[in-house]
Amino acid sequence: MKKSLLFVFLIGLPFITSAQDKKWSVEVHYPISVGEDFGASNQGVIGAGIKYRFTTVGKFNIGASLDATWFSTTSTNDSDPIQEFDIKNFFIQPRIFSELPLTNNNKLNLLGGIGWTWNRSVESLAFFDDQGEIQGSDWNNGFNLNLGLSYNLSTRWFVQAQYDLIFLSGDSPSRNVGLIKIGAGFRF
């Protein structure tokens, strides 16, 4: 019995550890905002994502992903007395993505994606105005593009860097937001 289990394990091991057979991955990243006023005033806290690869077309892996990112900062109002308040920004990004191996050993991959972004901006001084509307809290949304590189450390672990360009519009004036995300992931 033990020999049979060992035999099955050794025969199945190449199929278990092949990176191409892994349909799912989870990622954790550190976000950095760039461009416009948003980039100058926000500090990245953390981001996380999940991907599912549902098909392969030629050398391209194609799938869907969901990414969430959190930014937080303290803003100072130069009034008398000086006021400080916290601002938190949350980004939710579903998208369709593609991966293309750039090397024969599939270690280095080019990533690209297209999707949508919802942004929730919340100030600690949120209040109700005369019409009963909440002020200091905004929802924005818009189209996003994603481009990046990933490097496979093993069949399961990888590191990656990516850039998201988000075209936001909504309650606040339209603006473009750039996010750089540097992190690591695990395939299963």
Image (tube, rainbow, N blue to C red):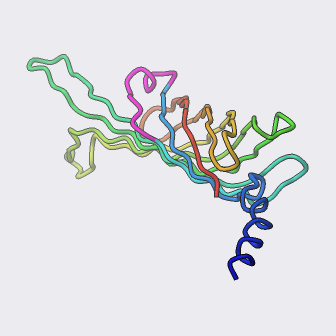
Residue 132 is situated, as x and y percent measured from the top left of the image, at 23, 52
Q: Which residues are magenta?
A: 34-46
Q: Does the segment drawn in magenta span residue 30?
A: no
Question: Could you say which is closer to the camera, residue 4 or residue 179?
Answer: 4
Is 18 left or right of 51, judged from the image as shown? right
Residue at x 19%, y 46% (from the top left corner): 130
Question: Could you say which is closer to the camera, residue 71 or residue 80?
Answer: 71
State which quadrant residue 42 falls in. top left
The N terminus, quarter of image? bottom right
Q: Is residue 96 above or below residue 5?
A: above
Residue at x 48%, y 27% (from the top left corner): 33
Residue 105 is situated, as x and y percent measured from the top left of the image, at 83, 39
Is 14 left or right of 91, judged from the image as shown? right
Q: Is residue 115 above or below residue 52?
A: above
State which quadrant residue 188 falls in. bottom right
State which quadrant residue 78 falls in. top left
Residue at x 60%, y 50% (from the top left corner): 186
Residue 74 is situated, as x and y percent measured from the top left of the image, at 27, 28
Is 54 left or right of 59, judged from the image as shown? left
Q: Residue furthest right?
A: 58
Can residue 2 be seen from the camera position used here? yes
Question: Could you say which is closer to the camera, residue 39 or residue 4?
Answer: 4
Residue at x 62%, y 40% (from the top left corner): 144
Residue 142 is situated, as x and y percent measured from the top left of the image, at 57, 42
Can residue 66 be seen from the camera position used here? no
Q: Does the segment drawn in magenta span residue 41?
A: yes
